[in-house]
C-alpha cells in the first residue's frame, strides 16, 4: 500500500477516533450533569418534605397556643405558618409534574391527603375557638384524631422521602455508571488514537520511510561519486519508497550503461588513435620492409585479440609471401598461391570459421580459430593480403571488421604507393633498355666520392662493346638493343655483389668496385671480357656472331684522386681499343696481346 494511502487512512481513523473521544467526553459530561441534577432533586425533595413536616408541627403549635392563650399573635403566626405550609404543599404538588414513579405519586397523594385533613381539623379548631367553643377547640387540637392525622402526615412525609431518596440514589448510581462508562470510553478512544498515531509514526515514518531512506542515502551518495558498483537491493513495495528505489535502480543502470559506453568510446578512441598513428607512419615509409614492420607493430595494439599476417605479392604475381606476422598465427602458411585464397579470388573480404557457413580458404590448416582474408588492392591492382585469426569464435573479428577493412584499404594504398615510388625511382636511376643504373646514378655516386673527405679505394671499369655499329647495320637496331641487354646481363652477373654496373651511354658501360684493388679489378674485368666473348648470342633464332668488349680500368688511391677516376678509366679504354680491342687495360700500363696484367 502506498504511503500516502496509509497516511490518509491513518488521518481518517485518527479524526474518527478523536471525534468519538470528544463525543464520549461530551456524553460523560452530560451524564455528570444528570448526576448532579439527580442529587439536586433529591436535596430539594428532602428539604421540602422536611420543611413541610416542620411547618405542620409549627402550625399545630401555633394553633394550640392560640386556643390555650387566645392571643392574636399566635393566631397570626398560625395563619402565617399555615400559608407557608400551603405554599410548601403547592410546591410538593408541583412535583407531580416531574418524572415521578407510581409509588412516589401515591405517597405524594397520601401526603397531600394527610396534610389537607390536618389543615382542616386545625382550621375547624381555630374557628370553634373564635366562636367561643374553647373546650371543643382544645379537645380537637389535643385529641387523638389530631394526633393520628399529625402522625400520619409525618409518616407520609417520611415514606415519600424514603421513596425519593431510593429513586434518587438509583438515578445517581445509574448516572454515575453512565458517566464512568462514557469516561472510560473516551479514555479508551483517546488511548486508541494515541496508539494509532504512534503506530503510524513507527510503521510509516520509521519502517517505511526513515529506514529505507537511510539505506538509499548511502546508495545515492555512492552513485553521486559515480561508484556504480553499489548494489541496489530490490524493493517490491508499490509505494513512493518503492518507486524511489526503482528510480535509483534505473539511475544506477543508466550510470553503468553510460560507463560502459564511455569505456567503449575510450577504447574506440584509443583504437582510432592507434590507427591514425599507423596511417601516419605508413605514409612516411620509404620501403616495403619498413611498412611491414609498422603493420606488425601497430596491429597487436589495435587488435589485441587477433593474430595475423601481412602478405605481399611477388613480382611475377605467382605467390604471396608473409612480410610480417604478429601474435603467432598458426592456421595460415607463410607462402601461399593467389588461387588458394577465396578473398583474392573474389576480390573482397572472406571469412573462414568453424561454423562452416562458407567455404574455407585452401591455405588454412584445420583449427577452431575464425579467420578473415582481406585483399590489399589499389589502382585496380592486388598488391597483397591482410590476414587475421581470432580465438573467441570471431566475436572480436566481427566487432573490429570495419576497422580491419579501413586499415586494409590504407595498407593496400601505401604498398601501391611504395611500389609506384620504387618504379618511379627505378625509372629515374636505371636505364630503361638494360635495367642497369643510368648515367645520372653514376654521376651521383661520383659526386659522393668526390665529397668524401677521405679517399676510399675504388676501382672503375669502363666497358665498350667492340664494333657495335656492325650489329645495328647488319642485323638492325632491335638486334643491337638485344646485344646490349645480353651484355648488360652478363656484366651484372659477373660483378655480382662486388660492385655496381651503370650504362654510361650508347654501347659504353661503367662498373664501380668499392674497396677494389688492381688485382681484383683486373680479375673481374677479365672474367667479364671472357664471359661476353664466350656467350652465344642469337636474336630471333639467328646467330649474331661473337661479341667482344674492350675494358679500361682506373683506381682511386692515395696518389690518384677519385675526381679523375672516370677520365682515367676512359683514357685506359681508348688505349685498349687502339691496341686492337677485346683487351683489358689498367690506367698507366700498356696492354699486351695476351691480356696479362701489365705494370
Image: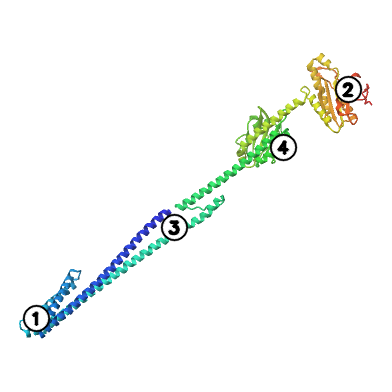
Rounded to the nearest whole Å, what is the CA distance between mark 2 and mark 1?
Answer: 205 Å
Residue 317 appears in the figure? no
The number of numbered discs placed on residues in the rendered structure image is 4
Rounded to the nearest whole Å, what is the CA distance between mark 4 and mark 3?
Answer: 71 Å
According to the picture, the residue beneath numbered tag 2 turns out to be: 571
The residue most toward the right is 599
Task: Using the image as rendered, state which of residue 349 and residue 363 is in the foreground.
Answer: 349
Rounded to the nearest whole Å, what is the CA distance between mark 3 and mark 2?
Answer: 117 Å
Identify the secondary structure beneath mark 3: helix
According to the picture, the residue beneath numbered tag 3 turns out to be: 204
Of the numbered discs 4 and 3, the one sitting upstream in the chain is 3
Q: Nearer the viewer, mark 2 or mark 4?
A: 2
Task: Using the image as rendered, state which of residue 495 and residue 539 is in the foreground.
Answer: 495
Name the spot of residue 512 as percent of width and height, x first. Answer: 84, 28
According to the picture, the residue beneath numbered tag 1 turns out to be: 126
- Mark 2 near mark 4, Cβ–Cβ under 8 Å? no
Q: Is residue 394 left or right of residue 473?
A: left
According to the picture, the residue beneath numbered tag 4 turns out to be: 293
Of the numbered discs 3 and 2, the one sitting upstream in the chain is 3
Name the spot of residue 58 as percent of width and height, x first. Answer: 16, 81
Badge 1: how crowded within 10 Å, few (<14), some, or many (20+)? many
Work out whether 202 lies above or below 68. above
Of the numbered discs 3 and 1, the one sitting upstream in the chain is 1
Q: Residue at x 53, y 47 (%)?
A: 253
Amino acid at each position: 500500500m502506498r504511503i500516502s494511502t496509509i497516511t490518509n487512512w491513518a488521518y481518517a481513523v485518527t479524526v474518527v477516533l478523536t471525534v468519538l473521544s470528544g463525543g464520549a467526553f461530551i456524553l460523560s459530561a452530560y451524564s455528570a450533569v444528570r448526576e448532579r441534577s439527580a442529587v439536586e432533586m433529591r436535596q430539594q425533595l428532602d428539604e421540602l418534605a422536611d420543611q413541610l413536616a416542620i411547618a405542620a408541627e409549627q402550625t399545630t403549635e401555633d394553633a394550640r397556643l392560640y386556643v390555650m392563650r387566645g392571643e392574636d399573635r399566635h393566631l397570626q403566626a398560625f395563619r402565617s405558618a399555615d400559608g407557608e405550609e400551603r405554599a410548601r404543599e403547592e410546591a410538593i404538588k408541583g412535583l407531580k409534574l416531574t418524572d415521578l414513579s407510581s409509588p412516589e405519586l401515591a405517597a405524594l397523594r397520601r401526603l397531600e391527603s394527610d396534610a389537607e385533613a390536618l389543615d382542616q381539623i386545625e382550621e375547624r379548631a381555630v374557628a370553634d375557638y373564635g366562636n367561643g367553643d374553647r373546650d371543643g377547640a382544645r379537645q380537637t387540637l389535643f385529641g387523638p384524631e389530631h394526633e393520628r392525622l399529625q402522625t400520619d402526615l409525618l409518616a407520609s412525609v417520611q415514606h415519600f422521602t424514603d421513596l425519593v431518596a431510593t429513586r434518587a440514589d438509583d438515578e445517581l448510581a445509574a448516572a454515575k455508571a453512565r458517566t464512568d462508562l462514557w469516561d472510560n470510553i473516551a479514555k479508551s478512544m483517546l488511548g486508541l488514537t494515541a496508539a494509532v498515531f504512534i503506530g503510524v509514526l513507527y510503521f510509516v515514518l520509521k519502517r517505511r520511510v526513515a529506514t529505507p531512506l537511510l539505506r538509499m542515502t548511502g546508495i545515492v551518495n555512492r552513485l553521486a561519486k559515480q561508484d556504480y558498483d553499489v548494489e541496489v537491493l530490490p524493493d517490491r513495495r508499490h509505494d513512493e519508497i518503492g518507486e524511489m528505489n526503482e528510480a535509483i535502480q534505473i539511475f544506477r543502470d543508466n550510470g553503468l550503461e553510460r560507463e560502459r559506453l564511455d569505456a567503449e568510446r575510450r577504447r574506440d578512441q584509443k583504437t582510432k588513435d592507434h590507427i591514425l598513428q599507423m596511417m601516419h607512419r605508413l605514409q612516411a615509409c620509404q620501403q616495403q620492409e619498413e611498412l611491414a614492420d609498422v603493420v606488425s607493430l601497430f596491429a597487436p595494439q589495435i587488435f589485441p585479440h587477433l593474430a595475423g599476417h601481412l602478405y605481399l605479392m611477388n613480382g611475377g604475381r605467382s605467390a604471396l609471401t608473409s612480410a610480417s606476422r604478429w601474435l603467432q598465427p598458426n592456421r595460415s602458411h607463410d607462402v601461399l598461391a593467389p588461387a588458394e585464397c577465396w578473398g583474392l579470388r573474389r576480390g573482397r573480404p572472406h571469412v573462414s570459421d568453424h561454423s562452416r557457413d562458407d567455404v574455407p580458404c585452401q591455405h588454412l590448416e584445420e583449427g577452431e580459430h575464425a579467420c578473415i582474408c582481406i585483399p590489399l588492392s589499389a589502382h585496380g591492382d592486388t598488391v597483397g593480403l591482410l590476414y587475421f585469426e581470432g580465438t573467441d569464435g570471431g566475436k572480436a573479428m566481427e566487432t573490429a571488421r570495419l576497422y580491419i577493412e579501413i586499415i586494409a584499404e590504407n595498407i593496400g594504398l601505401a604498398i601501391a604507393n611504395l611500389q609506384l615510388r620504387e618504379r618511379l625511382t627505378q625509372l629515374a636511376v636505371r636505364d630503361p633498355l638494360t635495367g642497369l643504373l643510368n648515367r645520372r646514378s653514376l654521376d651521383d655516386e661520383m659526386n659522393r666520392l668526390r665529397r668524401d673527405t677521405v679517399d676510399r679505394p675504388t676501382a672503375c671499369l669502363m666497358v665498350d662493346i667492340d664494333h657495335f655499329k656492325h650489329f645495328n647495320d647488319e642485323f638492325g637496331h632491335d638486334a643491337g638493343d638485344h646485344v646490349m641487354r645480353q651484355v648488360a646481363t652478363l656484366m651484372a652477373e659477373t660483378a655480382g655483389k662486388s660492385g655496381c654496373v651503370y650504362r654510361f651511354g650508347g654501347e659504353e658501360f661503367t662498373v664501380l668496385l668499392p674497396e677494389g684493388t688492381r688485382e681484383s679489378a683486373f680479375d673481374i674485368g677479365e672474367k667479364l671480357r671472357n664471359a661476353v666473348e664466350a656467350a652465344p648470342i642469337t636474336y630471333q633464332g639467328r646467330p649474331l656472331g661473337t661479341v667482344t668488349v674492350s675494358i679500361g680500368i682506373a683506381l682511386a688511391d692515395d696518389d690518384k684522386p677519385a675526381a679523375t677516376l672516370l677520365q682515367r678509366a676512359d683514357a685506359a679504354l681508348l688505349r685498349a681499343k687502339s691496341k686492337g680491342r677485346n683487351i683489358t687495360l689498367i690506367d698507366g700500363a700498356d696492354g699486351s696481346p695476351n691480356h696479362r696484367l701489365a705494370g
